[in-house]
Amino acid sequence: MSTQTLTEAKMSHHDLLKDQVAIVTGSGRGIGLSIAKKLAGTGATAVITDISQEFADSGVKEITDSGLKASGFVCNVTDVNSIEKMTEDVMNKFGRIDILVNNAGITKDTLFMRMKLEDWNAVIETNLNSVFKVTQSVIKNMSKVNYGRIVNIASVIGIHGNMGQANYAASKAGVIALTKTIAKEYASRNVTCNAIAPGFIDTAMTQKLKPEMKEQYMKFIPLGRFGSPDDVAECAYFFCTGGSYVTGQVIVVDGGMFM
Ligand SMILES: NC(=O)c1ccc[n+]([C@@H]2O[C@H](COP(=O)([O-])OP(=O)(O)OC[C@H]3O[C@@H](n4cnc5c(N)ncnc54)[C@H](O)[C@@H]3O)[C@@H](O)[C@H]2O)c1
């Protein structure tokens, strides 16, 4: 390939999402921040939303420091008013929303017998009800213009279950079923909706697990390493760029842990 063609190829890759606006929830750090960075690296404006302005700002800084476009907004995904305000603010500022990544999530692990109703509710509220609320708020703008890409971050736990994670497993299974339903209802509007089911990804969420437990997981990962947030971002990027004929799917990103 000549130097000029190479440069052109590089430029078109960097421009794939030019002018597009991508909202990523819970993107102040971790997997959400990696996804936002990857989309910004392809020309999109990354809308970094998180539970506090401070979290959102630190995500924005990381992206803008590398010369890419990002803008921060507070959005507590459990709070409809906060969500509605964020959507409105983003529409007022940019006039469009092309991509929504529902990423914000928490764990409150404990064995089923000991699980308090408040731990159950908090996880269902943050991981599942949030996807209903944020998507409902954003999708009307996609529907109107016949274009949208929605990516929901589920988990392999939502497919297989896990000891100590009844609330989390149920929330992520719910996200998968909701993904397929939205995919069916909005296909005629050219809005695709897919889910990613990550395995063990090295972030704050998994850093709090005991070393013995991590070793135990490692034994079942054929690729022999924990995933990085960038591994998940690659998959989100696919759904938002090349995957125009892919909808209602769940892609497992787990180093081969479950086959
Ligand atoms: N780390 C893993 O191994 C793993 C595996 C499978 C799925 N996931 C999923 O990936 C997503 C991201 O997780 P992570 O590992 O990056 O964790 P993380 O804890 O590093 O990041 C989660 C982000 O969500 C934000 N958040 C939490 N509650 C919120 C709320 N109410 N409103 C708005 N933002 C909120 C946090 O402030 C944080 O920035 C989650 O949905 C998680 O369930 C993670």
Image (cartoon, rainbow, N blue to C red):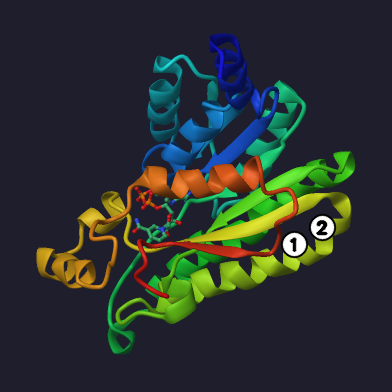
Total marks in image = 2
Q: Would you say residue 58 is visible in this rendering?
A: yes
Residue 8 lies in what quarter of the image?
Answer: top right
Residue 215 lies in what quarter of the image?
Answer: bottom left
- Where residue 9 appears, x then y in whole percent? 60, 22
Q: Residue furthest bottom?
A: 113
- Where residue 256 appears, x then y in whole percent? 37, 67
- Where residue 247 appears, x then y in whole percent? 71, 59
Q: Residue furthest left?
A: 212
Work out whether residue 5 or residue 85 is closer to the camera in this orientation and state it.
Answer: 5
The structure residue drawn at horizontal position 28% and vertical position 85%, both measured from the top left corner, is 114
The structure residue drawn at horizontal position 54% and vertical position 20%, both measured from the top left corner, is 69
Q: Is residue 163 above or below residue 69?
A: below
The structure residue drawn at horizontal position 58% and vertical position 67%, both measured from the top left corner, is 175
Amino acid on which disc 1 is placed: Ala
The residue identified by callout 2 is: 186
Q: Is residue 118 above or below residue 140?
A: below
The structure residue drawn at horizontal position 62% and vertical position 35%, both measured from the top left corner, is 22
Work out whether residue 83 or residue 155 is closer to the camera in this orientation and state it.
Answer: 155
The residue identified by callout 1 is: 183
Work out whether residue 9 or residue 26 is closer to the camera in this orientation and state it.
Answer: 9
Image quarter (top left, top right, bottom left or bottom right) of the N terminus: top right
Q: Mark 2 falls on what kind of element? A: helix
